[in-house]
Image: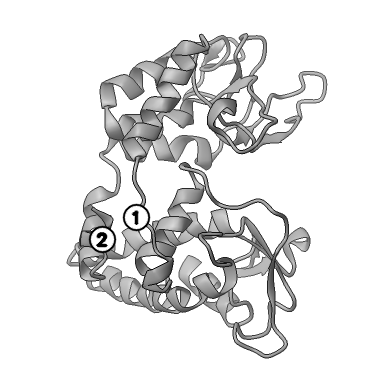
């Protein structure tokens, strides 16, 4: 069903805007018409890139046929990603303004402009899209730079929390629930480390259990120690004074006075995947097949 919907969307739009789904059809959300996000596209492309070899390895004919369909989509995406998001000199836009997203990528009346001066230059979620562009996304060799420092970035995050006496770590997440309305007050994106960040204003009031997934991939014991330190906080695993069968909630204030009373796929599945060992084996096979592995390592 998801494959059918995305394929149908691709016949009308040459990118993947934030979308809404109804009756097996996907259309851009009203606030994402003629706009497209780099970060979300990176997460989608990265997921599909690992999903294809996982399907191929099952020996199940229907799964292998589904893998072939996703491969067609991936091959198409490789021809468009750099054209849309890459602006030279290592610059990859966070959000692109599109003149007319129903036009083909190379149409003479088409244009792609950075919506703001913000770039995907972070070692967190934005790195997924950067990696795809570098290794399989159609960049010229002269525009490529090897990505290094994943483990170092993880150490920086844990050391920062120790140094600043922070009970956990940060991540993009839904903010605290207003107890008077039951509504989540905001969504946090500027949740980095000020001393090494290019953003001067950071939201440092909220810790996120899901933030530990990179740490778990580097060192499971260390990652789980940080995870536990956050999920034992007040109300992080309880609802109506009873244990919550769905696990921890979304996020908690660092002072323990409030939580985000919400459960999302984003804040949970990355930790689960990291605990299972990540998608490294699938992605490694994929990169070797694309002749991208040696350059990566």
Give the secondary structure at mark 1: loop
Mark sitting earlier along the chain (1/2): 1
Of residues 197 and 56, the one drawn nearer to the viewer in this rendering? 197
Which quarter of the picture shows residue 83?
bottom right
Give the farthest residue toward the right. Answer: 180
Give the residue drawn at x 57%, y 34%. Answer: 197
- The answer to whether residue 58 shows anywhere in this view is yes
In the picture shown, does residue 119 fall above or below 99? above
What residue sits right under mark 2 in the picture? 295
Q: How many marks?
A: 2
Residue 238 position, x and y percent, is 54, 15
Marks 1/2: CA–CA distance: 7 Å
Of residues 140 and 34, the one drawn nearer to the viewer in this rendering? 140
Of residues 209 and 161, the one drawn nearer to the viewer in this rendering? 161
Residue 229 position, x and y percent, is 44, 13
Which quarter of the picture shows residue 105?
bottom right
Give the residue drawn at x 50%, y 74%. Answer: 4
Is 181 left or right of 126, judged from the image as shown?
right
Of residues 204 and 61, the one drawn nearer to the viewer in this rendering? 204
In the picture shown, does residue 228 fall above or below 110? above
Is 184 left or right of 47, judged from the image as shown?
right
What residue sits right under mark 1 in the picture? 146
Residue 113 position, x and y percent, is 70, 68
Task: Tell me the number on the disc at residue 117.
Answer: none
Q: Residues within 10 Å of mark 1 (few under 14, many from 20)?
A: few
Callouts 1 and 2 close, C-beta under 8 Å: yes
In the picture shown, does residue 112 fall above or below 176? below
């Amino acid at each position: 069903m998801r494959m059918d919907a995305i394929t149908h969307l691709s016949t009308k739009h040459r990118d993947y805007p934030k979308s809404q789904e109804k009756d097996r059809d996907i259309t851009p959300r009203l606030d994402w018409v003629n706009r497209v996000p780099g970060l979300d596209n990176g997460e989608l492309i990265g997921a599909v890139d690992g999903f294809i070899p996982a399907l191929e390895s099952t020996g199940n004919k229907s799964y292998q046929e589904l893998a072939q369909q996703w491969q067609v989509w991936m091959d198409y995406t490789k021809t468009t990603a750099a054209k849309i998001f890459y602006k030279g000199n290592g610059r990859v836009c966070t959000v692109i303004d599109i003149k007319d997203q129903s036009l083909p990528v190379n149409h003479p009346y088409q244009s792609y402009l950075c919506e703001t001066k913000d770039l995907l230059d972070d070692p967190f979620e934005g790195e997924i899209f950067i990696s795809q562009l570098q290794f399989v996304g159609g960049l010229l060799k002269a525009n490529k730079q090897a990505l290094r420092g994943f483990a170092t970035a993880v150490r920086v995050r844990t050391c920062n929390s120790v140094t600043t006496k922070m009970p956990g770590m940060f991540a993009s997440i839904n903010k605290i629930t207003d107890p008077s309305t039951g509504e989540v007050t905001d969504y946090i994106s500027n949740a980095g480390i000020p001393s090494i960040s290019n953003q001067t204003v950071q939201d440092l009031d909220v810790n996120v259990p899901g933030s530990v997934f990179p740490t778990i991939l580097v060192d499971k014991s260390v990652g789980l120690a940080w995870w536990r330190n956050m999920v034992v906080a007040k109300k992080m695993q309880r609802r109506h004074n009873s244990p919550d069968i769905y696990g921890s909630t979304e996020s908690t204030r660092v002072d323990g006075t409030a939580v985000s009373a919400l459960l999302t796929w984003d804040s949970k599945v990355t930790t689960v995947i990291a605990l299972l060992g990540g998608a490294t084996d699938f992605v490694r096979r994929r990169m070797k097949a694309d002749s991208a592995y040696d350059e990566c390592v």
